[in-house]
């Protein structure tokens, strides 16, 4: 019966060992799998959603090249089949599989020998039509990081397909309204959230004394790197659904970056080929590569990945480029130091002014810089200002997991509070944290839900919380609408002023003889900044002429921008530098003021100094006196006529 079934499927001959996996080739399908030289290897073919005994095709010894076993089935269509391998009696899945069937229920236990099968790449996937990927350089990027499942599980009113790729397409209008132009997906390939074997060791992204069979909600683990996660799909066609997501994102001017975690034992070529595949087949715009299992220089040199965004942590781009400037910045560093130092500046630690200045200005010519205050690994933004200590009891590890170094400040009370002064200080500190990111030169990365105060109840390691703790609570959007509007306006302000997000680092000198330096530092005295360890004051003036293009004749209103930081716990004054005659400073933002939005209505003119409230940031623009206010000028004219 088996031989008859094989004959019906086609002729078996030796395959090509060079491309691992199951791939359609001219005249049939090529199967190549790696196993030891003395193994017994067989291909198992199953009817889709069928329960019959699979067709088993044994790999003859002559089909082996080194440790790779390869066969070809000719004159056959396998669109109604799925497959596995049997190696030394054990049924295993193909690590190069383009899809996995049997893992559709997130967190459910499974038997890899009985329930899980590999899928072939769909032959009839629809084309891309007129899809065109947005061309977003790092200096123009507003990055938004999210978990595919957790982001929409509680979005009851706005999303129909919760926790799925399709559900993310329903969030596109929200991202556009907020000002997001790039999203970063936490692992969305087919990882095993409930591993059948022992948990992986030395995973620096999950700090835990892990129990067996705990759900790996985040997904930082090895997996089937060529397959979209089926549990993140609302349909039975993961390839179609994910391609539809990318197509809709691109149609709306939004790029997509995916996170991939490659542990040390990962084969370098497998990692390279996986990223090439997602780039070519799914049109993914970039990758944030984590783990020690891939040669990052190899990725940067690869021709197929040329022009693709590649984000690394702890990689020395200066050593890689050796003084050369690439034609386009494709690589980027994920800047963990920004998080640590700017959190300490935010909480008024001593001696942080110099570090703050460096991070605000840091922006390399040869690579992008990703700045963030929070991510999944630690407190949310709201929890950063609400808790001094981690509260990971729900992880059932005795609160011993997660980092104990959070550089957080609870504003006087641990956890939720009804005290008005505490709530107002927390709101102020969240706004300060957002401005630290959005007014720094690097790429700001917002973690999902922080724009409306999402909380995890003080859990700073929610790796196993596939529940309301780890999911985004969309009720917070109504509760904290003012914070959302502030973030939205601050993003728009950044976009409107290119001097705040230049493609190269500002030099701090007037190297083009335009009359002012591109950026200058100020303290209690103009043109002088104190770096004393007791100082918590910082003023920066940006000269917009250094960002204005010659053909942009209208870009004159933002020639001067002043940002003042006061992280003392009382009012302090910052000196304001003189700007050209006929101009004055107008305050347009002040985090010490409570209410909705970023912009403030302040008719006062500032010339020599400005007093800033405790733990607050202010933003001023240099304006022509004739443009003070639409109401002030006519009144002044009437007064002059009366006096005459």
Image (tube, rainbow, N blue to C red):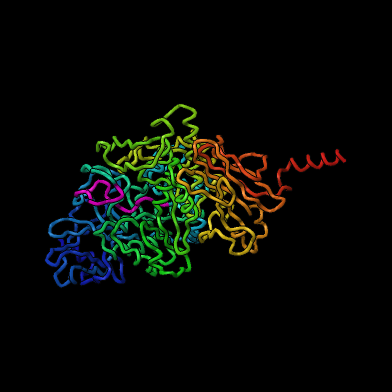
What range of the chain is rendered magenta? 184-206
Residue 25 pos. (x, y %): 30, 69
Q: Residue drawn at (39%, 62%), measured in percent from left and top?
A: 279
Query: Looking at the magenta stretch, what is its main secondary structure?
Result: loop
Query: Is residue 392 placed above or below 102 in the rendered structure?
Result: above
Most extreme residue toward the right, as rendered? 644
Q: Residue drawn at (21%, 71%), measured in percent from left and top?
A: 13
Residue 61 pos. (x, y %): 14, 70
Which of these two is toward me, 94 or 431?
431
Find residue 310 and report its image quarter.
Answer: bottom left
Residue 282 pos. (x, y %): 40, 59
Which of these two is toward me, 53 or 459?
459
Q: Which image quadrant: the N terminus?
A: bottom left
Q: Which image quadrant: the C terminus?
A: top right
- Residue 82 forms part of the magenta stretch: no
**Relative to 558, 317 lies left or right:** left
Q: Does the image show residue 216? A: yes
**Relative to 74, 88 lies left or right:** left
Residue 561 pos. (x, y %): 60, 50
């Amino acid at each position: 019966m088996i031989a008859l079934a094989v004959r019906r499927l086609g002729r078996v001959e030796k395959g090509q060992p060079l491309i691992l996996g199951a791939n359609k080739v001219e005249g049939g399908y090529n199967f190549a799998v790696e196993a030891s030289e003395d193994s017994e290897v067989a291909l198992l073919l199953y009817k889709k959603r069928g329960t019959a005994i699979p067709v088993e095709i044994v790999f003859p010894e002559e089909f082996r090249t080194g440790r790779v076993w390869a066969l070809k089935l000719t004159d056959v269509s396998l669109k109604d089949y799925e497959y596995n391998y049997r190696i030394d009696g054990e049924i295993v899945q193909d690590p190069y599989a383009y899809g996995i069937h049997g893992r559709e229920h997130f967190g459910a236990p499974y038997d890899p020998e009985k329930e899980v099968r590999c899928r072939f790449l769909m032959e009839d996937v629809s084309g891309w039509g007129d899809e065109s990927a947005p061309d977003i350089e790092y200096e123009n990027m507003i990055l938004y990081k999210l978990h595919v499942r957790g982001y929409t599980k509680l979005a009851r009113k706005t999303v129909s397909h919760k926790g799925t790729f399709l559900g993310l397409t329903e969030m596109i209008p929200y991202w556009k309204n907020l000002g997001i132009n790039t999203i970063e997906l936490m692992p969305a390939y087919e990882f095993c959230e409930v591993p059948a074997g022992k948990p992986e060791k030395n995973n620096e992204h999950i700090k835990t004394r892990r129990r067996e069979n705990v759900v790996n909600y985040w997904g930082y683990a090895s997996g089937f790197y060529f397959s979209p996660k089926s549990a993140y799909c609302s349909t039975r066609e993961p390839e179609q659904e994910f391609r539809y997501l990318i197509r809709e994102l691109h149609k709306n001017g939004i790029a997509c970056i995916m996170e991939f975690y490659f542990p040390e034992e990962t084969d370098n070529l497998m990692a390279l080929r996986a990223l090439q595949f997602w780039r070519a087949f799914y049109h993914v715009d970039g990758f944030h590569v984590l783990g020690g299992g891939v040669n990052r220089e190899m990725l940067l040199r690869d021709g197929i990945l040329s022009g693709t965004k590649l984000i690394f942590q702890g990689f020395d781009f200066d050593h890689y480029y050796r003084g050369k400037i690439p034609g386009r910045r494709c690589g980027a560093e994920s800047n963990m130091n920004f998080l640590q130092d700017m959190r300490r500046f935010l909480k008024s630690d001593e001696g942080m002014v110099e570090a703050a200045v460096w991070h605000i200005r840091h922006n390399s010519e040869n690579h992008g810089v990703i700045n963030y205050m929070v991510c999944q690994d630690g407190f949310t933004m709201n929890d950063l200002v609400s808790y001094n200590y981690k509260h990971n009891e729900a992880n059932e590890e005795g609160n011993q997991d997660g980092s104990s170094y959070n550089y957080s400040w609870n504003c006087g009370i641990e956890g939720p509070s009804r005290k008005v002064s505490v709530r107002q200080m927390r709101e102020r500190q969240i706004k300060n944290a957002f401005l630290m990111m959005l007014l720094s030169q690097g790429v700001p990365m917002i973690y999902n839900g922080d724009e409306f105060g999402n909380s995890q109840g003080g859990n700073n390691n929610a790796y196993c919380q596939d529940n309301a703790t780890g999911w985004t609570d969309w009720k917070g959007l109504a509760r904290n609408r003012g914070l959302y509007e502030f973030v939205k306006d601050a993003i728009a302000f950044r976009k409107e002023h290119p001097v705040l997000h230049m493609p190269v680092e500002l030099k701090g000198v007037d190297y083009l003889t335009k009359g002012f330096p591109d950026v200058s530092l100020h303290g209690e005295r103009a043109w002088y900044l104190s770096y004393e360890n007791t100082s918590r004051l910082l003023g920066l003036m940006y000269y917009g002429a250094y960002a204005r293009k010659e053909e942009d004749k209208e870009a004159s209103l933002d020639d001067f921008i002043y940002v003042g930081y006061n992280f003392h716990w009382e009012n302090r004054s910052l000196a304001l530098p003189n700007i050209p005659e006929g101009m004055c400073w107008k305050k347009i933002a002040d985090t010490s003021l409570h209410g909705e939005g970023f912009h403030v209505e302040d008719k006062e003119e500032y010339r020599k100094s400005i007093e800033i409230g405790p733990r607050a940031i202010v933003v001023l623009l240099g304006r022509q006196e004739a443009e003070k206010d639409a109401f002030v000028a006519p009144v002044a004219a009437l007064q002059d006529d009366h006096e005459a």
